[in-house]
């Protein structure tokens, strides 16, 4: 099984996974210009894996993509690009929330029964967050729903339902300092390759509906656009 996974929640990250092992990566630290960077990064990751630079020749079996929550433009770029890549390769595309990935990465470093709040930067001095528990060694279960709001709203939720905070590396300094009052867990760099574990688990359980590529915006977009990617 050979997969390509990409995420544009903050920066743009691409991974090539073969039978559960990462064989190629590419990453752009910029939180902007996602549409322009995706195709070069895909080619770079394929080259890093020693595969042909054209997706149709690379033997990809499925495309995995982060569904957010994230700001409109970057998220839309990633989802549109993933659908184009899947069409070019003639394979299915599956979506996973970035907060699911962050939660799973955090739980990999914690006791299996830990309850965590996965958080990521939502800009406008706000955060995206959700409360999660492990669903086996490779998946997570969301408790309640995903939220967006300022850090005080998160801290208020945590007073009623305690848990450790697992932060994506993009969380800004003003939120990080306020979170010093919370129970802090690990900070992680979102790794799109973790989607492979989550997708495999959900497919094995017949939970295909949890793998839709619908975007999670959580609030109205600031601008409108329809970026595309070609490969």
Image: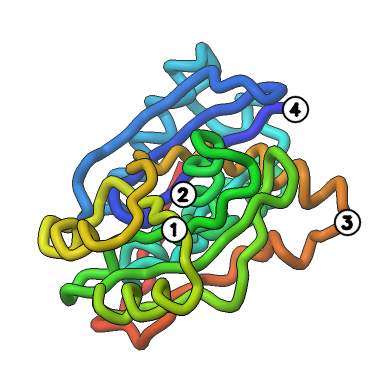
Secondary structure under the numbered disc 1 in the rendered image:
strand
x, y percent for residue 216: 49, 73
Q: Which residue is drawn at 57% across and 60% down?
A: 132
Earlier residue among tags 1 and 3: 1
Residue 220 placement (x, y as % from top left): 35, 87
Does label 4 or label 2 sit earlier along the sequence? 4
Q: Name the residue under label 1.
A: 118
Give the crowd class for mark 2: few <14, some 14-19, many >=20 residues within 10 Å. many
Contact between marks 1 and 2 (CB within 8 A): the answer is: yes
Q: In this view, does 39 lie above or below 116?
A: above
Specify which label sits upstream in the sequence, 3 or 2: 2
Asked if labels 2 and 4 touch by Cβ distance under 8 angstroms, the answer is no
- Residue matched to label 2: 102
Earlier residue among tags 1 and 2: 2
**Relative to 208, 58 lies left or right:** left
Position above or below: 200 against 219: above
Residue 94 in percent (x, y) is at 66, 54
């Amino acid at each position: 099984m050979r997969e390509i996974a990409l995420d544009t929640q903050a920066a743009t990250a691409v991974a090539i996974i073969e039978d559960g092992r990462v064989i190629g990566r590419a990453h752009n630290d910029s939180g902007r210009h996602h549409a322009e960077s995706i195709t070069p990064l895909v080619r770079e990751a394929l080259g890093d894996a020693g595969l042909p630079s054209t997706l149709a020749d690379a033997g990809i079996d499925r495309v995995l993509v982060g569904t957010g929550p994230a700001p409109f433009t970057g998220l839309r770029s990633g989802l549109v690009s993933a659908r184009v890549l899947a069409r070019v390769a003639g394979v299915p595309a599956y979506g996973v929330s970035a907060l699911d990935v962050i939660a799973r990465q955090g739980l990999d470093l914690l006791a299996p029964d830990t309850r965590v709040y996965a958080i990521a930067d939502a800009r406008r001095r706000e955060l995206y967050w959700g409360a999660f528990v492990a669903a086996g060694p490779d998946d997570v279960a969301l408790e309640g729903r995903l939220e967006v709001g300022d850090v005080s709203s998160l801290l208020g939720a945590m007073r009623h339902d305690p848990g450790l905070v697992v932060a994506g590396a993009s969380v800004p300094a003003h939120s990080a300092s306020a979170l010093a009052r919370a129970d802090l867990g690990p900070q992680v760099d979102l790794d799109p390759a973790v989607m492979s574990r989550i997708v495999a688990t959900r497919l094995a359980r017949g939970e295909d509906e949890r793998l839709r590529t619908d975007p999670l915006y959580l609030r109205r977009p600031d601008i409108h656009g329809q970026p595309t990617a070609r490969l």
